Amino acid sequence: MSEQDLYIGRAPWSMALEGFLALIIGALFLAWPGMTLVTITWIVGIFAFITGICAFVAMIGAPKGMRGILIAGGLLGIIFGCIFLAWPVGTTAVLLWLLMLWLLFYGIYKICIGIWQPSDDHSRWFDICLGLITVVIAVMLFAIPGVGATAFVLALLLGIYAVIVGIILICLAGATWSKRRHMSKG
C-alpha cells in the first residue's frame, strides 16, 4: 500500500482539526444547553462548512477513484454550512430538517469512505463507526417526536454526538499518523 492510498489521502491534521472542532462544539453545547436555536444554527453551520472544506483538501492526495465521494462530501458540507450561516434566523424554522438531512448525508458519506478503504486498513472502522453513529442520530431526530422541539434537548443531543465524533476523528488522525510514520520507516 502506498502512502497515497492511506486514508484516501486525507491529511491527519485535517482529521484532527475536525475532531478538535467537534470536541469544542460538543463542549459548548453541553456547557450551555439552553442556547438559542439561532446560536445552534451558527455553530452547526460552521462545523458543516469546515468539514466540507476538509473534504476538498483531502482530494489533493486522494487517488482518482476516490475523488468523487470527497467532492460530494465537500459540496454537501459547504452547501449546508452556507445555508445555516447565511440565514440563521430563517433556517432556524427548518433547522431540524436541514440538520437531519445533513447528518444523514454526512453519515452515509463517512460509511462510504470507510467501506472504500483498503480491507487491511483497520482504521476504516473509525469512519464506519462514525457514519453509523451519525445516521443513528439523524434517524433519532426524524423518528422521535419532539426531540428537536426545544433548543435544550437538541443542544444536549448534539453535544454528546459532537464529543463522540471528535474523539473518533482524533483517533482516526492518530491512526493515520502512526501508519504514515510506520510506512516511512519501512
Image (spheres, rainbow, N blue to C red):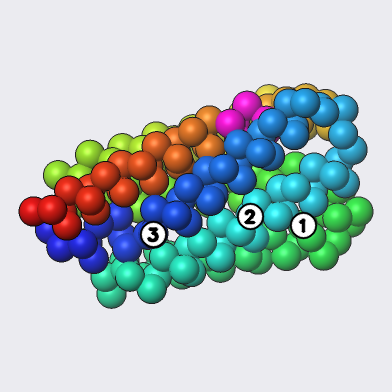
Residue pointed to by mark 1: 84
Left or right position of 82 against 108: right
Q: Residue at x 79, y 51 (%)?
A: 42
Quadrant in which the N terminus appears = bottom left
Marks 3/1: CA–CA distance: 26 Å
Marks 3/2: CA–CA distance: 18 Å
**Amino acid carrying mark 2 in the image:** Ala
Closest to the observer, 165 or 16: 16
Residue 84: quarter of image: bottom right
Discs 2, 1 touching: Cβ within 8 Å: yes
Left or right position of 7 against 52: left
Q: Is residue 162 magenta?
A: yes
Residue pointed to by mark 3: 11
Horizontal and vertical percent position of residue 110: 42, 48
Q: Residues within 10 Å of mark 3 (few under 14, many from 20)?
A: many
Q: Establish if 57 lies above or below 11.
A: below
Q: Residue at x 35, y 53 (%)?
A: 113
Q: Establish if 33 lies above or below 56.
A: above
Q: Residue at x 31, y 49 (%)?
A: 177
